[in-house]
Image: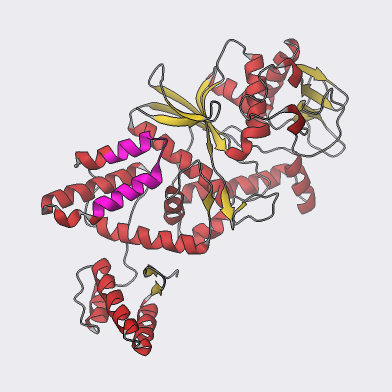
Amino acid sequence: MLKVYNSLINRIQETSFEKDEIKIYLCGPTVQSSPHIGHGRSAVVFDFFVRYLKHLKYKVIFVRNITDIDDKIIEKSKAEGISPKELSEKVIFDFHKAYSELNCLNPEFEPRATESIEQIISFIELLIEKGYAYISNSGVYFEVAKYSDYFALSGRKTDEVLSGTRIDVKEDKKKPEDFALWKFAKDGEPFWNTPWGKGRPGWHIECSAMIRDIFASGIDFHCGGNDLIFPHHENELAQSSSAYEDEVFVKYWMHNGMVNLSGQKMSKSEGNIKLLNQYIDDYGGELIRFFYLRSHYRKPQEFSEDLLIEAKTTLIRLQELLQEVDPVNSNEDTMRIFYDCMNDDLNTPKLLGEIFTTINKLGEKSKNDQKNIKQTIKFIFKLLGFELNFTLKIDQDKLIEFFKKYQIDFENLNLAMEKFIHLRETYRKDKNFKAADTMREDIYNLGINILDGETIEWYWRSS
């Protein structure tokens, strides 16, 4: 039974579905600038989720939106001397490139705010008609006091709330916590015509309108980064529950943790972002994807190039171990590990730990069992969106020749490196540092770097 952490009730709960169709909405990017490592994490961890549900034979309708008009997009486009549309198209291209390199499945629908104006206007009209929204001189606002369950998702209190808008401006609202559904246009800003005047949508209303338009009712899973819980998802919940009072808007709210740099949340507003496509170019999309697998999706994940290198070493060893087998579901015990971990709120770090424990015990198994286990491990990684294509950067004859200098027979790279590192450590313990340094330099020139520490790690150097 699949269990997930539901942010609305702040605990893990068993899921249940009325039919074999699952509706998932992931809050996608606001496209004022290119994606960073944090954007990649949200895309990948929920891609694991979608792939797993599809493996379980559910029909998944997966939607990931694009916010292509908002205050920051307008500001950034002015600074660059281009139109908001030109800026958003350029940034959308960067996001799509990253999604592709990370091997994320395409959503069934990818609505854009600027292409959903008609649906947004209809949704706002309904809120006005039901008495949840009012018109002022600056726009149309949702009146939070009219919705009794506000703060149910975030657990906040009124005195903690600012305006809930992307930019802190003094609007003519009834109360500070009221949030914009529609903003009347200022001079030189893009706009659309409405019954209330020219303007553009607020940030939150687009998601509610898109969900209603595509799914025609409530959904099973609403996903996104935990920085969106307030105000974005809180406001979505308020406006959707008010517009359609007899329906459950979302059954399960799932939120991923942030990526941190030296303990600080990575965000555009903090100015400490690392561009995702740069790291994909340097390390490859599969490695970045594997990096995200190593932490539980709900927890913060520390990011550094040292951690990427550590992940790279592990991934290469995994690739080499599985290179001679096909992905086949042929070992029941290994698959049971997979289901147990994934059903436990997508516990991918536990899954990795269990897989490597299994790998470490392969020597105790028969040749046939070893093959079946390897096939199944490769099958699991394929389910999770990994190709695990291993290509030696050095041909095997050259490797055989290199290790022969150190009286090491080359069977495979893992075993050869274990013997190489053991020999080098023997020199270091004997204080023959010159010989140890020579070994390190020799293998570095071959294309492999050795990291000395409490445990000795090695990895292919980036080309």
Residue at figure coordinates x 82%, y 24% from the top left: 175
Can you give x and y, in whole percent of width and height, for residue 51 in the image? 39, 37
Q: Does 344 appear in magenta?
A: yes
Colour scheme of the rendered structure: secondary structure
Rendered location of residue 58, percent (x, y): 37, 26
Say whether residue 382 is visible.
Answer: yes
Residue 177 found in image quarter: top right
The quadrant in which residue 239 appears is top right
Residue 329 visible in this rendered orientation of the protein: no
Task: List x then y, in percent, for residue 121.
Answer: 71, 21
User: Is residue 12 placed above or below 272 in the rendered structure?
Assistant: above
Indicate left or right for 443 with 174 as reference.
left
Q: Is residue 45 above or below residue 63?
A: below
Total marks shown come to 0
On screen, residue 354 versus residue 5, left or right, reads left
Q: Nearer the viewer, residue 281 or 248?
A: 248
Decide which of 155, 265 is in the foreground and name it: 155
Residue 48 lies in the magenta-colored region: no
Q: Residue at x 25, y 79 (%)?
A: 403
User: Residue 285: where, in percent of width, then height?
Assistant: 45, 54
Q: Residue at x 84, y 25 (%)?
A: 173
Q: Which residues are magenta?
A: 337-359
- Which residue is more in the foreground, 203 or 197? 203
Give me the residue at 64% from left, 29% from top: 155
Residue 297 is left or right of residue 212, and the answer is: left
Q: Quadrant of the C terminus?
A: bottom left
* Quarter of the image where one finds residue 342: top left
Q: Is residue 45 above or below residue 217?
A: below
Question: What main secondary structure does the magenta stretch of the protein show?
Answer: helix
Q: Quadrant of the N terminus?
A: top left
In screen coordinates, is 435 left or right of 233?
left
